[in-house]
Image (cartoon, helix red, strand yellow):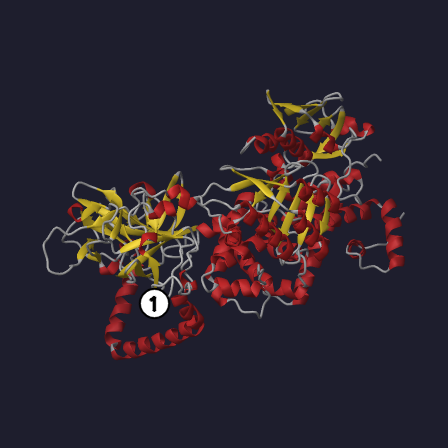
Amino acid sequence: MKCNYSIEDIINYAENVLPEESKAEMEQHIKSCEKCKKAYAAMVFTEKFSSKEAPAGDDFHLKILDHLDKKRYEKNKAVLFKIRSVLKPAIAVAACFVVLMTSFMYREQVGEFVSDTYKAISNKEDVPDNEDEPVPEPIYNVVPTKTAIITPCSGKKEPGEQYKDVIDLPYGSIIQISGMRNHNDNRWYLTSLVPGRQESYAGKLFWINIENTDPNGISSISFENCRVSEASTFNHVVIDKVDKPVLRDIYLYSLPDAVSDTVAYVREGDLIRIQRQDAEWSLVNRLPDGTDSSDIGWIKNENLALCKKDMKTNQGFIVKNILVLGSPNENSSPLESFKVKGQIAPVILGETNGDWTFITTKSNPVGGWVKTKDIITSFEGVDTHTIINPPIDKADFAEKIRNEIAQWEGILSINAYDTGNQITLNTSQREMLANSLTSLDDIEFFDGGISNDREAVYPFYCIDFNFGASTNSIAYNFIVAGDDKLVVNIPSFRYDHYGFLNDERIPVRFIKVNKEFVDAIKSLLPPPSNTARDNFNFLLNAQKVLVSGGEGTGPQVYKCARAIKKYLGNEIKTELIPRYVPNDAKEITSFEFIFSGSSPIKIVVTDKYILYDEKYYTLKGNPENILAELFAGYF
Amino acid sequence: MIELDTDEILISNALKGDMDSFSNLVLKYKNRIYTFLLKMTLSKEDAEELSQEVFISIYKNLYRYNNTWSFSTWIYRIAANSFNNFYKKRKRALKFDDIHDISDISCSFEDCPEVIYEMRENYSQVVSLINQLKPDQKMALILKHVKGFSYKEIGRILGISSEAARMKVQRAKESICRKFTKSNERSPQYEM
């Protein structure tokens, strides 16, 4: 039969823009016309391919944050960015004017220069590379870190030994790392000298092989950004053995050499971190002090001593929840601007008044008062473990979860991922769920990759906190892992809400709650039965699973069952078996799920199909990945 | 009280140095950008690398953003430019050997119940045909299926008029249909 339909008609049908009558006709036509059937299939596949969403890795955003300059939009730079759009063209116009005027005034010399340059270009082999060419952007930015050269080398124009030398770097040269790239099997850093040792190289970028750098560099710490593990390394203090009537400046140098440039100065009593110590000199980091001088430099060892308790220092640290008050008086109001965001923060010590010490920070020179006893100047005898791992009040934790459920401003949904069911909670449902959480009885910490597939019991309930109005953008979730147990996946941007979490402590991974809370979840999204053997979720009832010469129970059963489900396609009908079940299929792995009260289910995964309980199924995805999925991370 | 901000508030906070706000923006858009680049490159590694570049570029240029555009249109524009630069450096067509290498955007049979069983194994062939489109046609086609994008927005992302964007999508589909039906003309009839 001749086909009177065009490709455009098929496209319109696939896009569902045809009138109803035409749609019905087209539907009938496609059943009998091979060509239109194929064209339609192509459009369906095109639509499926184009609309499917693929998840980026769970830690994708963390990788991004690691590569950003977190200080880029600090307060004192915000104005500059705001006027940048005007500033740049204004500067460009002014620069053009200056160039034109200068060219006119020195037109004879300019003419000679142009002529000489032309001659040089035409003898190309005599012309060196243009040293003013910008260095290409790296693939990865890193948080700026300062360190030193420990093997004399040359800074390169590009990442690789074969490229041109840009600068000689003797031992001890201090560099700032701003980018990174892998080249062959080596890692190269994009760096600059800090501070400019030679004026001509000030701010210029070049590449260094990571092997030539000291690995103990840290990024700058500040009141807003300080880890306990870093703070506790500031365990030395500057001393000055020379008798003098007043405190004098002691210099930090750009090289372990007293005739090299100075980069900063310190004073007796300054807290110092030793990054690298040689026989006579040490590369040290100093704490922010309100100036813009370098926070890294070389100092003679004779000016350093271990900081003992009760030694007088010019800086110290305060921990989270220590109140900084407006005056040296317990009734005075706490200063919000001094609220410690992390677990610990460096401060500059000022005058004392009885039991109180006046403190300031680089970003807050106005200052406030704290109890002297609450300032850490030496970590000798300090329990840093407790600072990192403050006790968690379980009642408070439960209250915070209730608040989160009740007040989360995006969509709150419950998903049952084993069955594909979902419900978006309305206000009264949220309230009911929040109120059903009456106790939090136990907290379990776990330092390792937890796989939700492994921990979730049927039907894989997730309380999903979504961004905005979409259920495709999950901020974080809690997962039901038992009758009274939840897996909690709280990301760092919610640490402030919960208060006792931070990225230095072993994460909270499981909590034990009252059973009524889990029952409330089930009541909102009742689980369908999984007791029928032909239901894939039946596998989750197994007592044991045998796989790859080993066996597993409980969560290992769940992990295996869910991994298999991911790769399981449609059943291959008997009449199609000869075509889709070839004899030369290669077995990749096999499973045997053992049940009490039912015979085992055997599953064989090949590169062409899956044999599941003696029935054949097509494959979804690359089955070579199934074992990697199972055994990557915690099994 | 928890405050979950809109894009503009998140951007405003990020420009004041609040990294949590920028983190929220990344979390919100990471899957969409990654998916877009995965479909353009058909390589998980390249898509990941490009996606990172895109968000780093977004962060660096965040101060330039103004609400003449919607934020999603703006970041897709950056993603499109990143892909175009990547494609120019490659100077050769992106190879595509096996749909299962990009299993995240494979089509399961359950996804396409309306297509008869025997056609389903041709999904891979269709993806190959999409990959053979000119980059601008392919990009327009993929963007057309991003939720909420009109031809006007697609045109903005690609730097063309809305009508031109519509024509690119139409041409892309016609090309796929034509090539697919032609390539299957000689293949044996499937058994029902």
Quadrant where the C terminus of chain B is found in the figure: top right
Give the secondary structure at mark 1: loop
So how many labels did they put on this image?
1
Residue A556 spot, x, y in % from top left: 61, 29
B87 vs B45, nearest the viewer: B45
A504 vs A317, nearest the viewer: A317
Residue A293 spot, x, y in % from top left: 26, 60
Residue A27 visible, this orientation: yes
Residue A220 visible, this orientation: no
Quadrant where the N terminus of chain B is found in the figure: bottom right
Query: Which residue corresponds to the image point at 65% horizontal and 66% vertical from the top-left?
Result: B152
Which of the 4 image quadrants contains residue A416? top right
Pointer 1 indicates a residue of which chain?
A
Residue A222 as seen in the image, left or right of residue A108: right
Q: Residues within 10 Å of mark 1 (few under 14, many from 20)?
A: few
Query: Which residue corresponds to the image point at 10% horizontal and 57% vertical from the top-left?
Result: A244
Residue A318, placed above or below residue B153 = above
Q: Which residue was labeled with disc 1?
A: A366
Residue B83 as seen in the image, left or right of residue A48: left
Query: Which residue corresponds to the image point at 19% horizontal and 54% vertical from the top-left?
Result: A268
Identity, as a three-letter code, of the amino acid under mark 1: Val
Residue A339 as seen in the image, left or right of residue A21: left
Query: Which residue corresponds to the image point at 16% horizontal and 49% vertical from the top-left?
Result: A257
Which of the 4 image quadrants contains residue A91? bottom left
Residue A480 spot, x, y in % from top left: 65, 40
Residue A18 as seen in the image, left or right of residue A302: right
Residue B144, placed above or below residue A477 = below
Residue A337 spot, x, y in % from top left: 41, 63
